[in-house]
C-alpha cells in the first residue's frame, strides 16, 4: 500500500522550514501549550536504552535529539534536510552529530542504529512508506522506533483542535514570522494518516509490536514499533 504525505513538493518543504527556523521553537511551545518537550522526553524513554546509537530523523532544531541524549544514548545523530534548522540545532549541542540529508534516502549503512526517533516530521515527506522503510533499514534487529506526530483528533475534541490549528496557530505565526508557513500545518494534518493507518504503515514497513498512545488534546500520537 502507498502512503503519501505532505501537501507541498520536497523543495517547497525545505524552503518553508529554512524560512521558519527562527520561530520553530516558540511555535512548537505555542502549538503544544508547552507540552512538546515533555512528549519528546516520554518518547525517548520508550525507545532509547543506555549506550544506544540513536538516529533522530527530521531533527529540526534538535530538541528530540537532545531528549535522546539525555535518555542515555551513547551516540546521537540528528538528520534534517533544512540547512537553517541544522544551524540552530548545532548551537544547542556539540555532542550530537548533525547531518544534512534526506529521510527518503538515509546516508547510513544497514543496521547502523539501535533506536530511532522522528518528531513532527513523517507527516511532511512525500512517501511515508518509503521513509518508514528507510528507518527500518538503518535499525539493527531488535531496534526500536518512536514516531511522534500530529494526527486528527476524534470526537468532542476535534472541533477545538481544528480551531486551534486552523485559526489560532496560522494567525500567531504570521505575527511571529511575517509569513504564512503555518497555514500549511492544518492542511497537512487533514491529509495525514489516522493513528490506526499510521500503525498499519509501520507494520507494512516491517515493524512489529506496534503500539500507540494519544497525547495532548487528542491530536498528537506517539507510535512505537520494533524491528524483528
Image (tube, rainbow, N blue to C red):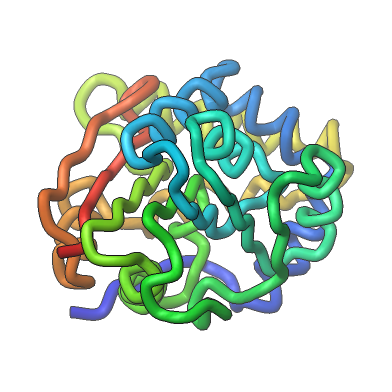
Apparent side of residue 82 relative to residue 13 in the rendered image (left or right): right
Q: Between 158 and 107, which is closer to the camera in this rendering?
A: 107
Q: Quarter of the image holding residue 192?
A: bottom left
Q: Quarter of the image holding residue 44?
A: top left
Where 67 sits versus 101, above or below?
A: above
Apparent side of residue 181 relative to residue 104 in the rendered image (left or right): right
Q: Between 174 and 95, which is closer to the camera in this rendering?
A: 95
- Residue drawn at x 88%, y 43% is 178
- Residue drawn at x 22%, y 57% is 142
Apparent side of residue 179 relative to residue 60 in the rendered image (left or right): right
Q: Which quadrant holds the N terminus?
A: bottom left
Q: Which quadrant holds the C terminus?
A: bottom left
Q: Between 33 and 162, which is closer to the camera in this rendering?
A: 33
- Residue drawn at x 37%, y 56% is 114
Apparent side of residue 22 relative to residue 79 in the rendered image (left or right): right
Where 47 sits versus 169, above or below?
A: below
Amino acid at each position: 500500500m502507498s502512503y503519501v504525505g505532505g501537501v507541498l513538493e520536497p523543495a517547497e518543504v525545505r524552503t518553508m522550514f529554512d524560512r521558519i527556523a527562527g520561530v520553530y521553537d516558540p511555535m512548537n511551545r505555542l502549538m503544544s501549550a508547552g507540552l512538546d518537550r515533555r512528549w519528546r522526553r516520554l518518547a525517548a524513554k520508550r525507545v532509547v536504552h543506555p549506550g544506544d546509537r540513536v538516529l533522530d530523523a527530521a531533527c529540526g532544531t534538535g530538541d528530540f535529539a537532545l531528549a535522546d541524549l539525555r535518555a542515555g544514548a551513547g551516540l546521537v545523530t540528528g538528520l534534517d534536510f533544512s540547512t537553517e534548522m541544522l544551524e540552530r540545532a548545532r548551537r544547542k549541542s556539540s555532542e550530537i552529530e548533525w547531518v544534512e540529508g534526506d529521510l527518503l534516502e538515509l546516508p547510513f549503512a544497514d543496521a547502523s542504529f539501535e533506536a530511532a526517533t522522528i518528531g513532527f516530521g513523517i507527516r511532511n515527506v512525500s512517501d511515508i512508506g518509503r521513509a518508514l522503510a528507510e528507518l527500518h533499514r538503518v535499525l539493527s534487529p531488535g531496534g526500536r522506533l518512536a514516531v511522534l506526530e500530529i494526527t486528527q483528533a476524534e470526537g468532542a475534541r476535534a472541533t477545538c483542535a481544528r480551531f486551534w490549528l486552523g485559526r489560532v496557530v496560522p494567525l500567531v505565526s504570521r505575527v511571529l514570522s511575517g509569513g504564512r508557513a503555518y497555514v500549511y500545518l492544518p492542511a497537512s494534518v487533514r491529509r495525514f494518516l489516522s493513528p490506526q493507518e499510521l500503525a498499519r504503515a509501520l507494520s507494512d514497513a516491517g515493524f512489529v509490536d506496534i503500539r500507540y498512545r494519544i497525547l495532548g488534546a487528542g491530536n498528537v500520537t506517539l507510535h512505537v514499533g520494533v524491528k524483528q
